[in-house]
Image (cartoon, coloured by chain):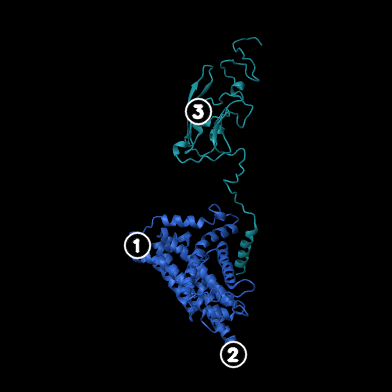
Amino acid sequence: MWSLIRTMWKVFLHAFRRRVTILYPDEKPYLPPRWRGRIILTRDPDGGERCVACYLCAVACPVDCIALEATEDPHGRRYPEFFRINFSRCIFCGLCEEACPTYAIQLTPDFEMGEYHREHLVYEKEDLLIAGPGKYPGYNFYRVAGLAIGGKDKGEAEGELPPVDVRSLMP
Amino acid sequence: MNEPFRSFVVIVGVLGTVLTVSAGLIWLERRLLALWQDRYGPNRVGPFGLLQVLADMIKIFTKEDWIPPFADKPVFVIAPAVVVVTGLMSFAVIPFAPGIWVVDLNIGVLFFLAMSSLGAYSVVLAGWASNNKYALLGGLRASAQMLSYEVFMGLSLMGVVMLAGSFNLREIVEAQRHMWFCIPQVLGLFVFIIAGIAETHRLPFDLPEAEAELVAGYHSEYSGMKFGMFFVGEYIGVTVISAMIVVLFFGGWHGPVLPPVVWFAVKTFVFICFFILLRASLPRPRIDQLMAYGWKVMLPLALLNLVVTGAAVLAHGGAV
């Protein structure tokens, strides 16, 4: 009996506690920078697309919500012909971000993606691509990679030594 | 003002007030529960979410009112009406303030007990007519609970009746001019509150509904406004019991400074909040615990209270 009265008193005292509810639409909750929300495609600092259409994200995706097709520009840079994410399937696991070798695909702290029509949840490349570099500002894949593209031959990347002639006997 | 017109005004006033208050309790309960659980509760529709009740009403009126094909139709339809009618009938005998009562009945206490007994039919019939095992279990529990708690609910009031020397609720209130009966009848008050919670099958004694085990108990099959009637009936029950606690134990309209009606309303409101606090804080007992508690603890307590009060009244030589 005493415990019941004590319980009631303790519950009553909660009337004077601070309320923990965040009144969401008026007051936005804090989302950490690494929050796994809406997926974006980023560009390198020079404004070129980072995505090299390697399909690793599509392979890593456990729900198969990413579809893309690779193509090449005249300089030999690979990029996706189309890039489609079906957000009605996406589980925001972030595996695509971890699989991406060029920091192109990134998850952002944004979850307000509600739609009245399910078709509207299928995001095309123009919906996904942003103007900036996202979470990795300085990174440019083609500038550090040893791949030869138009305007940059082998050995000309940052920190890369000139290629070695393996058939030569000279030191 | 001539007499028939006056009583008509009072009846309409009481009906309107009670129904509005009962509907408003839905909002109040949600807000208070939220307050005690460190939440906000409904605060979107209108100021402080007050229009939530209106939104709920629109929703519940426009919902499909479905009668299951396997149900006993006439009984199924009548059952929810019974709880509202008996609840509202109880208000007929409650004196709100000097001169404000629907009927000045000389057996007011008995009428109230009779109406709350009839209210049990609603739950039992609903459980039976639904033709559903969970509803029937809810109905069974309700009948067992309400019958056993009614026994000492009546007995707990007999002390008050002895002290006041009348079954008339108005005279009971008049008798509390100098001392509220909650002081000499503290045991009776305690027993009556517990019996009252069980009568209205409110938490923690909501075993007939017990959503964790019985879906929704006796109203599992009800939808639309029929479900709404049970809902409103429950809140009318809460209001009736709170009003009765005030009339029988807390001096009804008596109080300094403020007008009598305000005192009555304030006291009733406090007890309604107390009912909600009980819901917020206490867990539900098992049905066997409930029955054992009723028959082995509360009934002897009520009888003890009756005997002691009787002895005291005799020693003082008649009504105190």
Mark 2: give few (<14), some (14-19) or many (20+) Cα within 10 Å: few
Name the residue located 41 percent from the left edge and 55 percent from the top edge.
B62
Rendered view: A165 above or below B52: above
Depth check, front residue: A15 or A49: A15
Residue that numbered label 1 is attached to = B71
Q: Position of residue B3 (x, y in %)?
A: 47, 77
- 3D distance between C-alphas at marks 3 and 1: 59 Å
Question: Chain B, which colour?
Answer: blue
The quadrant of the picture occupied by the N terminus of chain A is bottom right
- 3D distance between C-alphas at marks 1 and 2: 58 Å
Q: Is residue B180 visible?
A: yes
The answer to which image quadrant residue A133 occupies is top right
The quadrant of the picture occupied by the C terminus of chain A is top right
Depth check, front residue: A27 or B54: B54
- 3D distance between C-alphas at marks 2 and 3: 99 Å
The reply to whether the C-beta atoms of the residues labelled 3 and 1 are less than 8 Å apart is no
Q: Position of residue B306 (x, y in %)?
A: 55, 82
**Element under label 3?**
loop
Question: Chain A, which colour?
Answer: cyan
Q: Position of residue B40 (x, y in %)?
A: 58, 54
Residue that numbered label 3 is attached to = A55
The reply to whether the C-beta atoms of the residues labelled 1 and 2 are less than 8 Å apart is no
Q: Looking at the image, is mark 1 or mark 2 earlier in the sequence? A: 1
Residue sitting at the far front = B1
Q: Amino acid at mark 2?
A: Gly
Label 1 chain ID: B
Q: Which mark is residue B317?
A: 2
Q: Amino acid at mark 1?
A: Ala
